[in-house]
């Protein structure tokens, strides 16, 4: 219904026009459906699905690059009839951390920056979705996309190892340990990257900031650890330095609890007690990232 008021010959006239609006009387699917839809849309968007061909190129290319070394390793193991794979399952993500960092740096801003730039976040919160639903859906979608990226090459290695008739029990144990490791890595990287990306509506700034935090921190910590190992060989100092980079944090956790070989200089991996500290820092960063995202979007949604 629309009301039009006009003045004619000094008298106020009111006209009522029926323009066809009527109330929605269909099913209302509620918050859970909206949250699932946002999660699904964000996860698909992380690989360019449902978007332009141009948007698919980088994520799909990085996915292929992540899996290609695993395929080569499997081919070599089968051809040479090796008794084990060239690389441990838990080492694969550490070796490929540059590709993982580039992927999350490109997709975290894509997930949240456009909503901030075009000011569509308040529309999400109008009804029925709430701040917590938005944050959980975005966080879960990026973490799931990261897990797919990091777990797919591990699956290639595992299937290849079984085809090469390597020891089933040993390969299954290593594969399961690596899945736990990349799950933690996915949660940690997704949380840190989303917090950084949500700080600016400019996608380019978000990409640069995420790369700087993930890549530069790893390079700086690894360099300082190498210097400490060369000068003093103090294993405790080397281990505690690993707390200052997301990659070395995951390395410390999997070395202490998942039977991985440490990539720290000199192989100075953390003990069980030191590993607990690493794990607590990882969980604290995950919880802290979620809390910061909640605070950020409460302000944006006002």
Image (cartoon, helix red, strand yellow):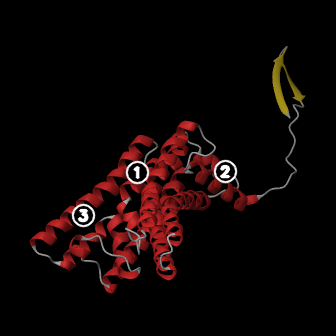
Q: Are marks 2 and 3 in contact (CB under 8 Å)?
A: no
In the rendered image, the residue lying farthest to the front is 80
Residue annotated with mark 2: 126
Rendering coords of residue 184 (x, y %): 46, 70
- Disc 3 to disc 1, how far (Cα)? 19 Å
Residue annotated with mark 1: 102
Identify which residue, 261 or 108, lies in the foreground: 261
Q: Which mark is first along the chain, 2 or 1?
A: 1
Q: Is residue 291 visible?
A: no
Classify 10 Å Cα crowding around label 2: few (below 14), some (14-19), many (20 and above).
Answer: few
Q: What secondary structure is found at the residue carrying circle 3? A: helix
Residue 268 as seen in the image, left or right of residue 158: left
Rendering coords of residue 300 (x, y %): 53, 50
Task: Decide: is 15 above or below 111.
Answer: above
Residue annotated with mark 3: 221
At a point 57% along the width and 51% down the height, the residue shown is 301
Q: Which mark is first along the chain, 3 or 2?
A: 2
In the rendered image, the residue lying farthest to the left is 231
């Amino acid at each position: 219904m629309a009301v039009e008021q006009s003045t004619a010959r000094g008298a106020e006239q009111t006209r009522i026009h029926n323009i066809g609006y009527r109330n929605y009387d269909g099913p209302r699917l509620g918050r859970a459906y909206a949250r699932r839809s946002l999660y699904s849309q964000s996860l698909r968007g992380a690989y360019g699905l449902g978007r332009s061909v141009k948007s698919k190129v980088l994520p799909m290319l990085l996915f292929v690059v992540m899996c290609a070394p695993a395929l080569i390793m499997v081919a070599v193991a089968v051809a040479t009839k090796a008794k084990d794979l060239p690389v441990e399952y838990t080492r694969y993500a550490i070796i490929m951390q540059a590709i993982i960092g580039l992927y999350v740096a490109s997709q975290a801003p894509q997930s949240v920056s456009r909503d901030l730039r075009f000011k569509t976040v308040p529309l999400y919160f109008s009804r029925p979705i709430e701040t917590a639903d938005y944050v959980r859906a975005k966080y879960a979608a990026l973490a799931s996309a990261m897990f797919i990226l990091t777990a797919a090459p591990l699956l290639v290695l595992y299937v290849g190892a079984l085809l090469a008739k390597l020891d089933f029990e040993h390969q299954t144990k290593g594969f399961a340990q690596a899945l736990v490791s990349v799950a933690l890595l996915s949660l940690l990287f997704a949380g840190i990257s989303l917090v950084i990306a949500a700080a600016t509506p400019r996608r380019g700034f978000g990409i640069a900031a995420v790369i700087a935090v993930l890549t530069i921190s790893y390079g700086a910590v690894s360099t300082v650890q190498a210097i400490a190992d060369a000068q003093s060989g103090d294993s405790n100092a080397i281990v505690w330095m690993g707390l200052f980079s997301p990659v070395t944090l995951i390395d410390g956790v999997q070395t202490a609890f998942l039977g991985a070989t440490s990539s720290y200089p000199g192989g100075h991996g953390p003990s069980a007690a030191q590993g607990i500290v690493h794990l607590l820092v990882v969980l604290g960063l995950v919880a802290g990232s979620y809390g910061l995202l909640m605070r950020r979007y409460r302000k944006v949604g006002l």
